Amino acid sequence: MRPIIYILSLLACLSLATSCKYSRPHKQYSQAQAQFAPFDGVIIPGVPFRDSSWNRVMKLRVYWAKYLWDQGMTKNIIFSGGAVYTEYSEAKIMKLYAMEMGIPEEHIFLDTLAQHSTENVYYSYWVAQDNELENIALASDPYQTKGLKRFVYKLNRKYKANVQLLPAMTDSIISQPLPDYDIEFEKAKEDSNFVNITETQGIFYRLGGTMGLHVDWENRP
């Protein structure tokens, strides 16, 4: 495939993946609650941590994790994300917030390898396998969940898995008080050798990562 066609294909796929969201997350939640709950674990993908505070997307995802925990929908949480765009591990930052919210540390697992959204699912799946968490789901905001739907289905086919999708019921989250928390964010800082991903990967290579093109399906991490 010529480079320009490859690039245009990536852009087209990315546009399709992010142009829509789950239209009925409440229905998805009800079906999951009836058929699969409680999950052994849910995967919460990370967001870059900047300016010593979480942004609204990370806040929504962590509060979604807390909602699922409080409702008895999951026994454990898997936070995913390395130090990608900043020197702070996304998974470790979310863990610090979750613990402040009252989720016990022993029920929190981390994937600190993922650099792209598809890798959030891929590496977290193996974290779940290593910890005997068989019944798991991807639980993120509706836009990201929609964008990762095909990748999750591919993972299920490849490994004969049964990862479910739990898009956040945004209205149920934002209707509740959403206080901020003070965390010791320095605890989530990676070593001094951190390099921003934009300095090691070009934009089109990163787009390929977003589409799951760099996942090694044959050799587990």
Image (cartoon, rainbow, N blue to C red):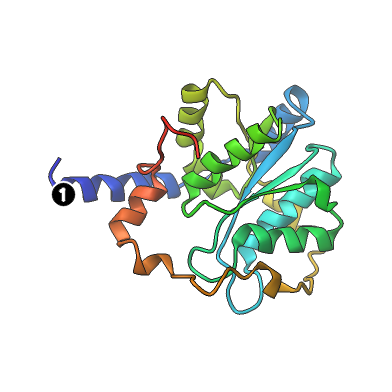
Instruction: Give the labeled residue for mark 1.
Output: 3
Q: Residues within 10 Å of mark 1 (few under 14, many from 20)?
A: few
Image location (x, y in percent) of residue 79: 66, 51
Query: Which is more toward the observer, 57 or 181?
Result: 181
For residue 172, say whether it is visible: no
Q: From the viewer's perspective, tell me whether residue 221 is left or right of residue 181.
A: left
Front residue (pair 73, 46): 46
| Nearest to the observer: residue 129 or residue 138 | 129
| Residue 179 position by quadrant | bottom right
- Residue 51 is situated, as x and y percent measured from the top left of the image, at 60, 79
Q: Amino acid at mark 1?
A: Pro
Does the image show residue 95? yes
Looking at the image, residue 191 lies above or below residue 29? below
What is the secondary structure assignment of the residue under circle 1? helix
Q: Who is closer to the viewer here, 195 or 183?
A: 195
Residue in the image at 84% along x and 41% along y: 71
Residue depicted at x 50% and y 40%: 221
Residue at (64, 66) in percent of width and height = 56
